[in-house]
Image (cartoon, rainbow, N blue to C red):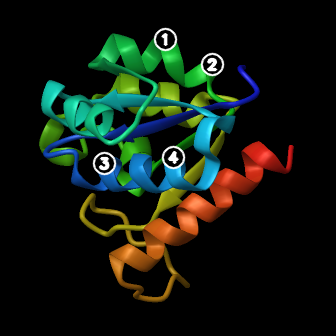
């Protein structure tokens, strides 16, 4: 595990990952190494364009890098096999959920999982909260 490595995992169009990377870079500046892990090349590219330190794409990249991260940030779907219209493979979900990294997950209900007790909150607010939590995990130790 690398002390200042934050992995942002996203797929499909990469829009949420792009926003997470942008806001994490604003919050942390150079204090963190932000690794964009895309389930596809477009998602990785979107995250790299907004300030990720490095990027990698696909199942093997996620399987290899998830255990290295201190914090993994993404939507709930990143721990659900076959989510994101099948882009998130069972091996990816296992690697992310089994990683010793702290997982900071945004509870979106588009993956067939409803988290009870979570209030409906606008996505921009959820992203801001996730960024604050992830940043505090890296800065606060």
Percent coordinates x, y for residue 31 in the rendering: 68, 37
Query: Separation of disc 2 and disc 3 at Cα?
Result: 21 Å
2 vs 3, front mark: 3
Disc on the earlier residue, 4 or 2: 4
Q: Are marks 3 and 4 in contact (CB under 8 Å)?
A: no
Quadrant (top left/top right/bottom left/bottom right) for the N terminus: top right
Give the mark count. Answer: 4
Q: How would you rate the neighbour count of disc 3 (Cα within 10 Å): few for under 14, some for 14-19, many for 20 or more?
A: many
Q: How would you rate the neighbour count of disc 1 (Cα within 10 Å): few for under 14, some for 14-19, many for 20 or more?
A: few
Q: How would you rate the neighbour count of disc 4 (Cα within 10 Å): few for under 14, some for 14-19, many for 20 or more?
A: many
Element type at mark 4: helix
Q: Which residue is denoted by mark 4 in the rendering? A: 25
Percent coordinates x, y for residue 6 in the rendering: 58, 35
Disc on the earlier residue, 3 or 4: 3
Query: Separation of disc 4 and disc 2 at Cα?
Result: 19 Å
Element type at mark 3: helix
Q: Are marks 1 and 2 in contact (CB under 8 Å)?
A: yes
Give above or below for 19 relative to 78: below
Q: Which residue is denoted by mark 1 in the rendering? A: 64
Percent coordinates x, y for residue 97 in the rendering: 55, 37
Q: How would you rate the neighbour count of disc 2 (Cα within 10 Å): few for under 14, some for 14-19, many for 20 or more?
A: some
Element type at mark 2: helix
Disc on the earlier residue, 2 or 3: 3
Give above or below for 79 relative to 100: below
Q: Which residue is denoted by mark 2 in the rendering? A: 68
């Amino acid at each position: 595990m690398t002390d200042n490595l934050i992995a942002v995992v996203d797929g499909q169009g990469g829009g949420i990952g792009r926003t997470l990377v942008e806001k994490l870079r604003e919050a942390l500046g150079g204090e963190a190494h932000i690794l964009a892990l895309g389930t596809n090349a477009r998602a990785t590219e979107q995250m790299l364009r907004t300030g990720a330190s490095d990027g990698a794409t696909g199942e093997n990249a996620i399987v290899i890098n998830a255990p290295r991260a201190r914090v993994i940030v993404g939507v709930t779907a990143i721990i659900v096999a076959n989510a994101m219209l099948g882009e998130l493979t069972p091996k990816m979900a296992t690697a992310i959920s089994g990683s010793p990294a702290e997982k900071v997950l945004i509870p979106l209900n588009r993956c067939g999982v409803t988290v009870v007790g979570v209030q409906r909150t606008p996505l921009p607010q959820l992203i801001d909260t996730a960024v604050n939590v992830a940043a505090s995990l890296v800065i606060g130790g």
